[in-house]
Amino acid sequence: MAGEVAMEAQEKEAQVAAWLKKIFGDHPIPQYEVNPRTTEILHHLSERNRVRDRDVHLVIEDLKQKASEYESEAKHLQDLLMESVNFSPANLSSTGSNYLNALVDSAVALETKDTSLASFIPAVNNLTSDLFRTKSKNEEIKLELAKLEKNLTATLVLEKCLREDLKKAELHLSTERAKVDNRLQNMDFLKAKSEEFRCGIRAAEIGELQRRQIICPRLSSCRYSQYNFKRRQPDPEAQALKHCTLLSQTRDYGNDSCAMSKCLDACVAFHL
């Protein structure tokens, strides 16, 4: 078994060498690595090349046979013309030769089997039909091209409009952003001013209460400086007089936070 494989490999190498020598002829064969894989590839190529050469040889032989048949037919027709009307192409004038050559060229171009009128008319009709089909197809292509050009123009106009709208939108956005920033700055300023006015109003209210001797001077620095003025107690006048009298007697505000709280409640309720 191994011997058969070795013999087959040697046979393939010999076929490849012969094929390469035939291909390159007198030129040197390029160096290549001889191994089973390269040998198999080159053998496959040689087989395909051999099949192709055989097909080409068959086509050439067929063409030679047809040429021989055409030559025999032409000689037969020429002999027939000479025998019947004593006519030979060599006896034609230059104009007649030109007409005959044009007739032959037309038959070759139209791919007719001969130069008879029965062969020319169907060939010309087929050629005319092909011409009409080609013209119709060209018209359809022109219409489609015109439609595409129109769509392209509309698309370009739309793109230009969109670009202009985008620029306007960006300009409007920048303007609105500047307005919003300005409004935010104004709002911060107004908040600061509002807080300042609120503190001023509270200080003025406390000062007014101090001026009327309703609360003591140290009340403004205690933890009740932001007291809720909406709270009301029953009998605010009596409570205010009672607790203010108590505080004026003791004069110790820090240790009497409960009395101070009651005084603040009564004084604020009485003042409001």
Image (spheres, helix red, strand yellow):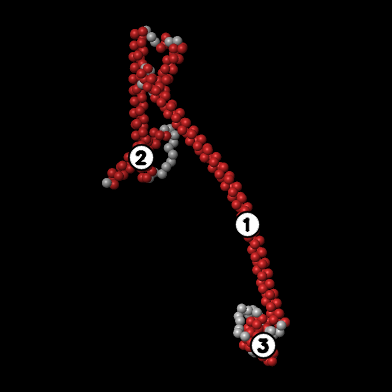
Q: Nearer the N terminus, badge 3 or badge 2?
A: 2
- Residue 21, given in percent of the width and then of the height, sits at 39, 35
**Measuring 62% from the left and 53% from the top, which residue is drawn there?**
172
Question: Could you tell me which secondary element the residue under label 3 belongs to?
Answer: helix
* Foreground disc of the pair 2, 1: 1
**Measuring 34% from the left and 14% from the top, which residue is drawn there?**
76
Name the residue tied to disc 2: 44
Res. 176 mark: 1
**Distance between the Cα atoms at labels 3 and 2?**
127 Å
In the image as oriented, which residue stretches furthest toward the left?
A: 1
**Distance between the Cα atoms at labels 3 and 1?**
60 Å
- Residue 37, given in percent of the width and then of the height, sits at 37, 45
Q: Is residue 19 visible?
A: yes
- Residue 80, given in percent of the width and then of the height, sits at 34, 11
Amino acid identity at mark 1: Glu
**Measuring 56% from the left and 45% from the top, which residue is drawn there?**
159
Amino acid identity at mark 2: His
